[in-house]
Image: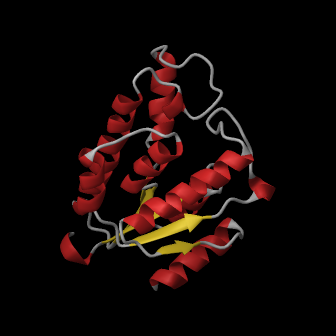
Amino acid sequence: MGLGQRKIVITGGPSTGKTSLIEGLEKGGHHCFHEVIRSMTLEAKHEGEIKHFTTNPIALVSDPMDFNRKILKARVQHYREATLLPQSNVFFDRGIPDVLAYMDHFGQDYGNEFIDTAAENRYDTVFLLPIWEAIYVSDNERFESYDEALAIHDHLWEAYTRFGYHVIEVPRDTVEGRVAFISKTLNL
């Protein structure tokens, strides 16, 4: 697509409605890349790397750095695939800086490989979904407590602003209302 394409991130802490919003955008005809960690978590579970889910898999795998590199690589792959698409607007369920935000949250060190990758692969717009207690649920893929989710939200905000993004918070609303907010903000 080239320079005219907009790469748009939908991010937020656990259980903020990202997946539902991505599905709503897809129903509206937009191309969306889905979150990669869900399939990676299932893979780690099947390989016996994670036995009991009590927290985010990044904190449980035997080699967190390797797991984070795989997430980073998968998000870079989505970014590169987007550049080949004809659509002028492409949405991502989480972006590259999310990897750093989660590593910050879990106190995991990372080097220039992660920082440089986040700096070199720039998105055009970042939408952050706030923690919303009314819809917050822990399940087989969301392990964090409500307070941990709030802390992750803060790490996400910090990671994106550290890389110079203007983060736009999406109001708490129905999926349709959130899609309308994003459409209006982006002049779709």
Q: Residue at x 42, y 29 (%)?
A: 64
Q: Foreground: 23 or 132?
A: 132
Q: Quadrant of residue 125?
A: bottom left
Q: Residue furthest left?
A: 2
* Vertical arrangement, residue 186 with respect to residue 117, above or below: below
Q: Position of residue 18 (x, y in %)?
A: 58, 56
* Vertical arrangement, residue 129 with respect to residue 182, above or below: above
Q: Position of residue 187 (x, y in %)?
A: 46, 86
Q: Residue at x 49, y 17 (%)?
A: 46
Q: Is residue 31 visible?
A: no
Q: Is residue 110 visible?
A: yes
Q: Position of residue 32 (x, y in %)?
A: 43, 58
The number of numbered discs placed on residues in the rendered structure image is 0
* Vertical arrangement, residue 10 with respect to residue 112, above or below: below
Q: Quadrant of residue 188?
A: bottom left
152 with respect to 10 (left or right): right
Q: Residue furthest top?
A: 48
Q: How is the image coloured?
A: secondary structure
Q: Residue at x 21, y 69 (%)?
A: 1
Q: Residue at x 46, y 81 (%)?
A: 186
Q: Foreground: 56 or 136?
A: 56
Q: Foreground: 65 or 28?
A: 65
